[in-house]
Amino acid sequence: MTQNLSAAPREDGRADDELRKITFTRGWQDHPAGSVLVEFGRTKVLCAASVEIGVPRWRKGSGLGWVTAEYAMLPSATNTRSSRESVKGKVGGRTHEISRLIGRSLRAVIDDAALGENTIMIDCDVLQADGGTRTAAITGAYVALHDAIEHLRKEGAVKGNPLKGSVAAVSVGIIDGVPRLDLPYVEDVRAETDMNIVMTGDGKFVEVQGTAEGAAFDRAELDALLALGEKGCADITRLQRAALGLDA
Amino acid sequence: MTQNLSAAPREDGRADDELRKITFTRGWQDHPAGSVLVEFGRTKVLCAASVEIGVPRWRKGSGLGWVTAEYAMLPSATNTRSSRESVKGKVGGRTHEISRLIGRSLRAVIDDAALGENTIMIDCDVLQADGGTRTAAITGAYVALHDAIEHLRKEGAVKGNPLKGSVAAVSVGIIDGVPRLDLPYVEDVRAETDMNIVMTGDGKFVEVQGTAEGAAFDRAELDALLALGEKGCADITRLQRAALGLDA
Amino acid sequence: MTQNLSAAPREDGRADDELRKITFTRGWQDHPAGSVLVEFGRTKVLCAASVEIGVPRWRKGSGLGWVTAEYAMLPSATNTRSSRESVKGKVGGRTHEISRLIGRSLRAVIDDAALGENTIMIDCDVLQADGGTRTAAITGAYVALHDAIEHLRKEGAVKGNPLKGSVAAVSVGIIDGVPRLDLPYVEDVRAETDMNIVMTGDGKFVEVQGTAEGAAFDRAELDALLALGEKGCADITRLQRAALGLDA
Amino acid sequence: MTQNLSAAPREDGRADDELRKITFTRGWQDHPAGSVLVEFGRTKVLCAASVEIGVPRWRKGSGLGWVTAEYAMLPSATNTRSSRESVKGKVGGRTHEISRLIGRSLRAVIDDAALGENTIMIDCDVLQADGGTRTAAITGAYVALHDAIEHLRKEGAVKGNPLKGSVAAVSVGIIDGVPRLDLPYVEDVRAETDMNIVMTGDGKFVEVQGTAEGAAFDRAELDALLALGEKGCADITRLQRAALGLDA
Amino acid sequence: MTQNLSAAPREDGRADDELRKITFTRGWQDHPAGSVLVEFGRTKVLCAASVEIGVPRWRKGSGLGWVTAEYAMLPSATNTRSSRESVKGKVGGRTHEISRLIGRSLRAVIDDAALGENTIMIDCDVLQADGGTRTAAITGAYVALHDAIEHLRKEGAVKGNPLKGSVAAVSVGIIDGVPRLDLPYVEDVRAETDMNIVMTGDGKFVEVQGTAEGAAFDRAELDALLALGEKGCADITRLQRAALGLDA
Amino acid sequence: MTQNLSAAPREDGRADDELRKITFTRGWQDHPAGSVLVEFGRTKVLCAASVEIGVPRWRKGSGLGWVTAEYAMLPSATNTRSSRESVKGKVGGRTHEISRLIGRSLRAVIDDAALGENTIMIDCDVLQADGGTRTAAITGAYVALHDAIEHLRKEGAVKGNPLKGSVAAVSVGIIDGVPRLDLPYVEDVRAETDMNIVMTGDGKFVEVQGTAEGAAFDRAELDALLALGEKGCADITRLQRAALGLDA
């Protein structure tokens, strides 16, 4: 790893291991059981958790619940307008990939048996994109999921606690040889290596997805990125707890 | 028309010819040339106007511009979650119909020649639905369109003024025999007759779409609804001008 | 409203408030319960009403029937060949919009409870298009629906009379400032304002859809169009009754 | 071949080698260059030949023309209503297969070089189905193609004669061991073997498609069907020539 | 028939009525009940027969089984890469046509009642194409079907023998006036007439599909092709029996 | 990490850090510039690299080449038959995700400028699935890509060497607390954590994708999996070099 000690400072003035300003607006929408507008700087994702009684056919009679997710981006969310997937008539590969990632990440903290035969559908709609939309989506989706489950518990629709823990996610990358946390779009497009890390609130990994965008990376670089991700997820976990009014 | 003089007051306490609280948040998004979050009570629609150089193939070489619109609803916007059209792989009839209505309404105040061979795409994404989403969309889209055109003019991309006037829209309906303005969802589902009216700022009609939901309506009822729509559109026009900082 | 008193006479020699020659050929097809070829001048629409036992899933157990419609146009029906929607793999916005309009119009005269849990599917296939295809479709579909219901009643499949009245439709428009009834294609493309009016046999409105094609229209113009539409629908109602052999 | 000498007579009273009543109504539609309503008994197919200047991309610059076909069936054409392919969003296998067959059959009598870089699209829309729709479609399409080419020649759009000959088609089958010509639906569903034969006016084969529906067939049965098909196509050729006003 | 006695010999040195080298590799895959890699020269088709308990909805309760087929081609199988149908989002006409042909051919030797309410799905995936893929597919599919049925019988899932006979297929064509058996790609593209013949092991016809590619063909040519097809199918039947270890 | 020292031995008798038998059959198909059948135990993937002159529209005029991939699975490849994506009319999320992974992995070793404006399309079709299909696909695709590029170089279609290095991939996972290399299906479904690692021949990472299937994993477990992946990729690199006849 050739670390460039004289790297230019970040455009937004943050330290290399510092998150953007992250906010959670709970109850942004009236209808879903949980609805959170999460913002990572200028990235805005509306995360809604809707509860449906029953589970998909292949899971019927198992006594187990199901949590799944759909990610999408408004055409107007991006720098230059992107075309609408409903109009194109098909969901693109990137959308599919991220929807699946969000679903897996949330299922990692769900006790399917405690949920019972209920389905929670998580919709993550990106209203504005400035890098890190998938990690913001996971982070906000957890808060919406939490609220939806509290709603179910208050209504007596589930007995125990289907939520086994919390989950947070962040992007990290190497820019001009320097590992940095929580990349906005201008850094993301310049990153040599880009990694998305999803962790539980107690510091374990749920997903690690690292991609060499420009050049392959060595083990030392990988270790530096993992450390930065661990730090970022721990910070985000604290913000999630604060937003939910839980004692840190 | 059997007007029920003892009709129950409106649930939200409004007079029959009174609009819900309408707000316009301009510049809600950073990327599009015009971006407005319009709220009619609890109905929230994000309207974005994106400019593209060039026009669709069938209009090339005409010297004329083009304005078109796409309407959509977030799955989480409705009372019970609706399925995502991109996932279903096709745009539904209602969505098509409303997208076309918005496009036609805005084109009524556009001078195609002054716009030149530029396309303005209007995206109207319903973030929360509580009745009147299509009329809120047209109303907000006009403000976004205005901002996008101002942007084009400042940049010198168009010379004259492609905007010939303003456009506003409102829903009216007959509930228990009483004509009412600007129906929220609870009134909309109970309406015997439902009408959407689109008018220019100088009081002319662009679209009149009346539908007998329960029973056919007579000419007197139609006239009452038209009068109410004229009143509502005039009120909305004033609010649009105020939001745009134009002297009323 | 600037009425152009010296407007050129209509190309087909009709008075401004005169319908084209309208004919109904009942029983044009052998298989459907009702089948009518309706002609408005050179516009030809084949309307078929097919009966199915049972209703869509969302209506099961309600004891209520369902009437719905599908409109389509043969590729060879238009001036220049249009492409086939099945080959394109999707139904276009205009097609969707008209199918929905036909369905709503017919449901306005149906007593769902008297129909019982039966579905009547109305297919309106345009064999030749010369303006006014949607209003011809509604007009012919009513006759086909009538025949299908008579068939059901003869078979004893329904007890009372699910048909509460009749429905007719016509287009009106303003050409060179003159309101005209029942526009053929050459007038339709030149109309400043275009309105489709659907009325019951007893003179009430079911649908009013007015669109400013060129310039917005004022209330006086709207009133003139409504009056013309009322006159046209009354005339068509008489022709429908004659075609059905009912005493006028 | 076990020929059942005591076979019941045909329901419609025809001899085994006799065609149904075949009629051609030329100019049924106003817009296409050629438009023919062909009837084989109760089977009605509307065949339209539309001319477009230019050829598909893969054929550009070759100097050669192109003839292709699309076959479809109205939902109301069949015994029990069939669902609409545009609504299903895809063209079915049977439709594809027949469209391709019609296209190949007509191309057999076309001189691509004489046609020049023009495309003729043949639309065959079945308005009523009573067996033999694909063979009726080919038979009628030839007449529409003839008229479209005459139209091109009159306009001077082509120089020589792109039509090298005529083409006719008929179905044959074995019912209760008896070979029969031109099967209506009631015979078609009972046929052990079903064959569609397409021939040129000078007695050569263009397509032979035989299918064992119930039991495999031997060479003698095949020969009997071929002979019957040859007879039927010769009869149809005479009817085509008469309809076109050519001296037999 | 103008037979060209001085025709150039075949590129691969075969006699005109000689098959390419045909091999069957049974059990090529581990999972399906029957799996056969069939090779006709350089044409390679992987045929798999998978058994599912139950039948499609329209056949439920009939006591009868169902055999159906899906044919497809790898993009890399052809001379120049062809695009992937899943990516295009629709199955092409040729693919549909061949899938239907394979299904019909196999059903000709199936006793539906003996099969009981089981479905056998035949997948024929062309791994390399050098002409005659559809006839190779039918030929190999029969062997895979045989193995799947033996598997069902060993497991006691069916009682009697659902297989009433064997089925084989071959292509024949006329090249430079000479009828030839089993055409590779280089001959296929030059053939004036092309015929696919499907026959049972006891010498009866299941399908005969002849197409004039260049010029229409006369009865003598047709007879010559049929004779060649009969010869080829008989040869292939012997090879199938040998591959299955049945006494010839 | 709780390592279960008494874990049962692997079903196939391998050591925990031992690969399955891996074979490469080069030139399996005749048509593509590179074609390799790669086998990892019972997993068989046919990898084809086809060259096309030119690049996608968005890359035209850049002077740079493009490498992309499509992954698919035969319906008959899996334990129980899976449905065909072309028939379903859409590519599933998993397929999309893997196609994108393969493309990115190969692009990591491509010098776009040296390739020039040529496109190499990699098709990876799984003929039999027994775990690790995506890593086998990447591994085999590299060999096919190598052969395609050699072909281009021999033909003089590219000047320098567009291949900057080699790429190999392997799956690792934790089964009953024990990290294991190259998981077959029976281990894959039981893995608590599953990781796919893609590395260059000189030991750098291209992709790291780790997923907690059952329980989140800690940093020690992650490190163990990374070490195992590094070992496996190094072993596979040697096998690739041997298959390509390069001096190890």
Image (cartoon, coloured by chain):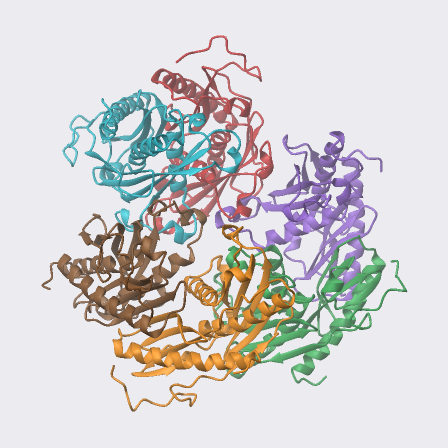
Chain colours: A brown, B cyan, C red, D purple, E green, F orange
Q: Residue B155: x percent and y percent?
A: 36, 33
Q: Residue furthest left?
A: A247
Residue farthest to the right, as pictured: E5
Q: Nearer the viewer, residue C65 or A135?
A: A135
User: Is C154 drawn above or below residue B160 in the view shown?
Assistant: below
Look at 67% across and 84% down and name the residue there: E246
The x, y position of residue B78, in whole percent, is 27, 47
Name which residue lies at 62% across and 46% down: D71
Q: Is residue F127 above or below residue F67?
A: below
Q: Judge left or right: residue A13 versus residue D199.
A: left
Query: Vertically, is D5 above or below B165?
Result: below
State the residue at coordinates (73%, 40%).
Answer: D116
Q: How many marks?
A: 0
Q: Quadrant of residue B221?
A: top left
E31 horizontally vs F175: left or right = right
Residue D10, x across and y down, in percent: 71, 51
Residue F28, quarter of the rendered image: bottom right
In-front residue for pair C222/A17: A17
Viewer-nearest residue: F196 or C147: F196
Residue at the top extreme, as displayed = C6
Position of residue E147 in the picture relative to residue C205 (left or right): right
At horizontal 34% and vertical 90% (from top left) the residue drawn is: F8
The percent coordinates of residue F1 (x first, y second) are 25, 81
Of residues B2 and B226, the one nearer the viewer is B226
Please state, as top left, top right, bottom left or bottom right, where the N terminus of chain A lies in the image.
bottom left
Residue E119 seen in the current view: no
- Image quarter of the C terminus of chain A: bottom left
Q: Can residue D54 be seen from the camera position used here?
A: yes
Question: Which residue is farthest front?
Answer: A6
Q: Quadrant of residue D44?
A: top right
- Position of residue A22 relative to residue F172, above or below, is above
